[in-house]
């Protein structure tokens, strides 16, 4: 993590943050349960998912599972996430309001960044990690250029990540990946295999980098 690390710790070295963005509360619950059974240890419930705060409350107490709030757009979202048991807060943008509220609540702040200005602002506002979004549009080569002036940061690539792109992202300096559709778009029955495939790709890429 960066120099602003929260007292709350997130085992980001697992390399995988599962994103729940579903059409219904029950679908979100089924996705999350399947991810837990597949061995995923970090799950983000987005505010666009019906019943997101209820789902956070349901899953926050599970042993070994780290649950957070995604698509946090304002301090009210942060407060509701905190009350529900979220440990971290992720947003698609760099918001001073969201980052400051997250840090005040004692949670881990992971704002979305896409430019050097975003990165500088996010760090100044107190971010713990940086969500590079949308990753597929920004490319690993772009990240290499952007991160050079900002050493010591932890990067989470999110948006359009594929199994084939894992290695280039790892080589570019990414620590972990935010994965939604790549894990859940095939339905409940595909989640375990897809999670295992991404874990294997991440481990192989880390070995190649070393």
Image (cartoon, rainbow, N blue to C red):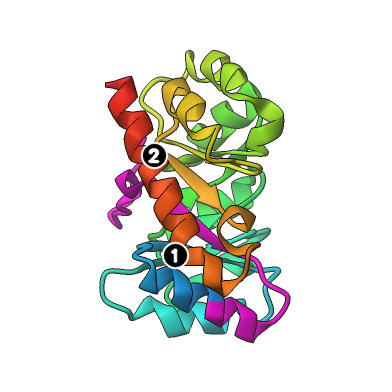
Q: Residue at x 53, y 49 (%)?
A: 178
Quadrant placement of the C terminus: top left
Identify the magenta region: 1-30
Residue 63 to residue 208: above or below: below
> Where the N terminus falls, by quadrant?
top left
Judge left or right: residue 50 versus residue 162.
Answer: right
Q: What residue appears at the point 44 percent right and 65 percent down from the top-left corner? A: 192
Q: Please provide percent x and percent y for residue 123.
A: 49, 33
Separation (CA) of disc 2 from disc 1? 15 Å
What secondary structure is marked by label 1? helix
Mark before the other along the chain sequence, 2 or 1: 1
Element on which disc 2 rests: helix
Residue at (33, 69) in percent of width and height: 65
Whether residue 187 is in magenta: the answer is no
The residue at which mark 2 appears reads as 202
Is 27 colored magenta in this rendering? yes
Could you say where residue 141 lies in the image, as x and y percent from the top left? 58, 16
Position of residue 7 in the picture relative to residue 137 (left or right): left
Per the image, the residue denoted by label 1 is 192
Q: Is disc 2 surrounded by few (<14), some (14 to 19) or many (20+) residues within 10 Å?
A: many
Residue count near mark 1 (Cα–Cα under 10 Å), binned few <14, some 14–19, many ≥20: some
Q: Which mark is residue 8?
A: none
Residue 149 percent across, percent down from the top left: 48, 14
Residue at x-position 39% and y-position 71% = 36
* Nearer-the-camera pick, 12 or 209: 209
């Amino acid at each position: 993590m960066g120099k602003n690390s929260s007292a709350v710790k997130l085992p980001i070295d697992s390399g995988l943050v599962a994103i729940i963005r579903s059409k219904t509360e029950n679908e979100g619950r089924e996705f999350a349960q399947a991810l837990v059974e597949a061995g995923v240890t970090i799950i983000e419930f987005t505010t666009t998912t019906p019943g997101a705060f209820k789902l956070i409350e349901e899953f926050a107490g599970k042993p070994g599972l780290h649950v957070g709030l995604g698509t946090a757009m304002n301090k009210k979202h942060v407060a509701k996430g905190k009350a529900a048991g979220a440990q971290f807060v992720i947003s698609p943008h760099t918001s001073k309001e969201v980052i400051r509220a997250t840090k005040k609540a004692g949670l881990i702040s992971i704002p979305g960044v896409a430019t050097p200005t975003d990165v500088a602002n996010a760090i100044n506002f107190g971010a713990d990690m940086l969500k590079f979004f949308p990753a597929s549009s920004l490319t690993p080569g772009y990240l290499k250029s952007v991160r050079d002036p900002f050493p010591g940061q932890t990067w989470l690539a999110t948006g359009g990540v594929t199994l084939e792109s894992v290695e280039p992202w790892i080589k570019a300096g990414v620590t972990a990946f935010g994965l939604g559709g790549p894990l859940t778009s095939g339905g409940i029955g595909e989640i375990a295999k897809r999670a295992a495939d991404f874990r294997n790709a991440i481990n192989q890429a880390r070995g190649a980098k070393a």
